[in-house]
Image (cartoon, rainbow, N blue to C red):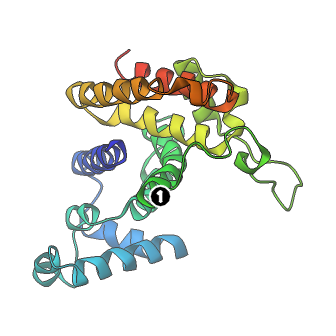
Amino acid sequence: PITLNVEHGFKVKLLNMIAANDVIDGYEIVEEFKNYDERTTSAYEQTVKYLEENLYSRGLYEKHKPDFAIWVLIESMTFGALSQFARFYDDKYSTRESSFHTLQLQMKNAKRIRNAVSHSNPILMNLNNEAGLFPVNQKTGRRQRSSASVVSSAAEMGIEKDLLRNVKINDLVALFYLNKRMTSRESRQHMVRDGEALVKRFDKHEDYYLKTDSIQEFKKILVKLIDFQLN
């Protein structure tokens, strides 16, 4: 699945960046992450608990406790914990001008679609009504909107900015952008074949939703997301 490919690619990229940075110690960065703020502390504790309780990783826990190196910790992080580590790393070791900063911002958006997929949530619901839009900020009274990085990625794909008002479209743009940046061309070729098969499946009973504008629009967006992978 595309979400697993992105997750693996992100972990590899982070580990390569850490290994290439002479300033970073693989053990000290874990302590920094653990104590950075409440969210990173929670992500650290969640990951260590998983290491301890999971039958496949318990051996790693017993071998490395209580001092875990970052290459042990990252491999066992969930998508959410990985997103928190990416935020921490971006704040502490990256710059706003770096390519990693853009990837980290996209990761926050992609996390929502990843969680939805893991719980088999329907994607085609609320594509063109208010329930599918970004929520209103209670403090400002204004509706939240896409980040500049997602808007820029959508423009690369030929997807109109106005469509990003829908959270699902916004998150899919972020996910497919990360997939292109994080995975090999060979991997994306497999994904494109699967994607093209899905688009073809849309047409099997086209008469069912020929007059459903939201599904017709989503199909066009899906084609653009897929085409972007090999462009």
Whether 124 is drawn above or below 153: the answer is below
Whether 82 is drawn above or below 170: the answer is below
User: Hey, which quadrant is residue 80 in on the image?
Assistant: bottom left
| Figure quadrant of the C terminus | top left
Nearest the eye: 211 or 143:
211
Q: Label 1, on which residue? A: 115
Can the viewer see residue 163 in this picture? Answer: yes
Q: Is residue 77 left or right of residue 106?
A: left
Q: Position of residue 129 (x, y in %)?
A: 76, 42
Q: Position of residue 54 (x, y in %)?
A: 22, 78
Q: Position of residue 199 (x, y in %)?
A: 43, 25
User: Hey, which quadrant is residue 219 in on the image?
Assistant: top right
The structure residue drawn at horizontal position 49% and vertical position 47%, both measured from the top left corner, is 110
Nearest the eye: 193 or 85:
193
The structure residue drawn at horizontal position 60% and vertical position 22%, both measured from the top left corner, is 159
Q: Is residue 134 left or right of residue 204?
A: right
Q: Position of residue 15 (x, y in %)?
A: 25, 51
Q: Is residue 117 left or right of residue 131?
A: left
Q: Residues within 10 Å of mark 1 (few under 14, many from 20)?
A: some
The three-letter amino acid code for the residue at tag 1 is Asn
